[in-house]
Amino acid sequence: MNRVIVVGGGLAGVRAVEALRRKGHEGEVILVSAERHRPYDRPPLSKAVLAGDADDTTVEVDWDDLRCETLLGERATALRPGDPRGGTVVTTAGELEFDGLVIATGATPITLPGHGAQHVLRTIDDARDLRARLTPGVRLVIVGAGWIGAEVATTAARKGCSVTVVEAADAPLSGAIGPEVGALTARWYGEAGVELRTGVKVAAVEPGSLLLADGDRVAADAIVVGVGVRPELGWLDGSGVEIDGGVATDAAFRVTVAGTPRSDIVAVGDCAAWWSNRYGRRLLVEHWDTALNAPAVAAATLVGEDAEYDPVPYFWSEQFGRMVQYAGHHPVAERTLYRGDPDGSKWSVCWLTGDRLDAILTVDRPRDLVQARRVMTAGTPVDPDLLADPERPVRETVKP
Ligand SMILES: Cc1cc2nc3c(=O)[nH]c(=O)nc-3n(C[C@H](O)[C@H](O)[C@H](O)COP(=O)(O)OP(=O)(O)OC[C@H]3O[C@@H](n4cnc5c(N)ncnc54)[C@H](O)[C@@H]3O)c2cc1C
């Protein structure tokens, strides 16, 4: 394999470049990325960067050492896979032939209809732009009480903005963790001085206000739309690459082209829907830990090693002064079980099927998270009665 092209310069892209070199790939590596910035971390954008506590989150990498050519501010516009291997990526900088390809184009925020200005939060430029608008007294309306919406609300309220969050579902985070657990976070908004309006559908973003589906308007000096993201896949149209929510891959991140799994084309990060043998389904995990760790497996596949990615997915969020962490995959679970009082300050919720721990969400209980993640990774059964005791460490609830 001579030339590998990595399309997308987010965390997944840069980690793929590093992993390729670590795995001994000696040929050319070219990183093509639509952003003009060197790869940077996104989690701080809605936290420290928005708060003004950080301004640069560039991933520390020695590009010379990596011998990687970077084409920044350039976009892949089409993919022409060769038969049976290799192919060509068409980019705004010209056509690039490849022997190996990493698809790491991430995701793009969904926006709403209407002619009013909509702020989204995906890039460092988005974060700097929004930060400049968060001044005391500004009426900020956030559409979507998801992870990003809550984080922006946290920072904006701290900066003295008058913050309203409008959510179509009946509870925050319903899509991510279900309405029962999501509803437990609703009071956090009020306590932070943020108005939360649930069950409210938005029709359009207009200049100076949000038009609701029932005809009402919510006046705003600035509107942030945080209603989710879509994998960035348009450039793959017509390429024959299989799509299943994201780029469909097997557990080794091999992409299927025209019905054939290809060891020379892999996809990772927010754009990839990978097969999880652990859960028996494809997962599209739009979180940092996956972008960090999956590329090592994808690079192994490219250099011809046998590898499989099968972790217990993990992510975190910082909401209204609380550290919220999640591990596992709750949609497979039968029931929930609480450790501690969810009306209190520190608690966890476990999702279980029989004596199998499927997922955990912790609020300021990092030890629960770490231990539960280990238990889930090992697949060891737990005693639900013991697990319900918040004083007992999760690791001591494992069945002998
Ligand atoms: C504000 C914010 C806060 C977050 N906070 C958390 C958190 O607290 N915890 C957590 O677990 N996760 C968090 N995440 C999620 C995490 O940052 C993402 O999962 C991670 O960035 C995904 O990395 P990626 O490399 O797959 O995609 P991206 O970071 O989206 O990178 C993809 C890159 O590809 C480029 N690109 C797209 N299309 C093309 C093309 N056609 N040609 C060339 N380049 C292209 C894009 O411009 C982009 O630079 C947060 C994300 C955001 C936006």
Image (tube, rainbow, N blue to C red):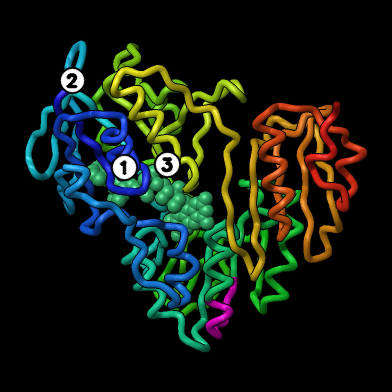
Q: Position of residue 385 (x, y in %)?
A: 92, 38
- Report if the beta carbon of the residue with label 3 is closer than 8 angstroms to ligand 1: yes
Q: Which residues are magenta?
A: 156-164
| Whether residue 213 is situated above or below residue 236 in the rendered picture | below
Expressed as whole percent of the image width and height from the top left, the position of residue 6 reads: 24, 37
Residue underneath mark 3: 270
The label number, if any, that marks residue 13 in the structure image: 1
Residue 255 percent across, percent down from the top left? 35, 22
Q: Few, some or many C-alpha atoms within 10 Å of disc 3 (few <14, some 14-19, many ≥20)? A: many
The kind of secondary structure element at disc 3 is helix
Assign a secondary structure to mark 1: helix
Looking at the image, can residue 214 be seen? no
Indicate whether residue 40 is drawn in magenta.
no
Residues at discs 3 and 1 in contact (Cβ within 8 Å)? no
Q: Amino acid at mark 2?
A: Gly
Q: Are marks 2 and 1 in contact (CB under 8 Å)?
A: no
Determine the residue positioned at 40% across, 17% down.
306
The answer to whether 54 is drawn above or below residue 378 in the figure is below
Residue type at the position of mark 1: Gly
- Dot 2 alpha-carbon crowd within 10 angstroms: few under 14, some 14 to 19, many 20 or more: many
Q: CA distance from mark 2 to mark 1?
A: 19 Å
User: What residue is shown with label 2?
Assistant: 86
Going from the N terminus, do you reach mark 2 or mark 1 first?
Answer: 1
Residue in the image at 88% along x and 53% along y: 391
Q: Nearer the viewer, mark 3 or mark 1?
A: 1
State the image quarter where residue 150 is shown: bottom right
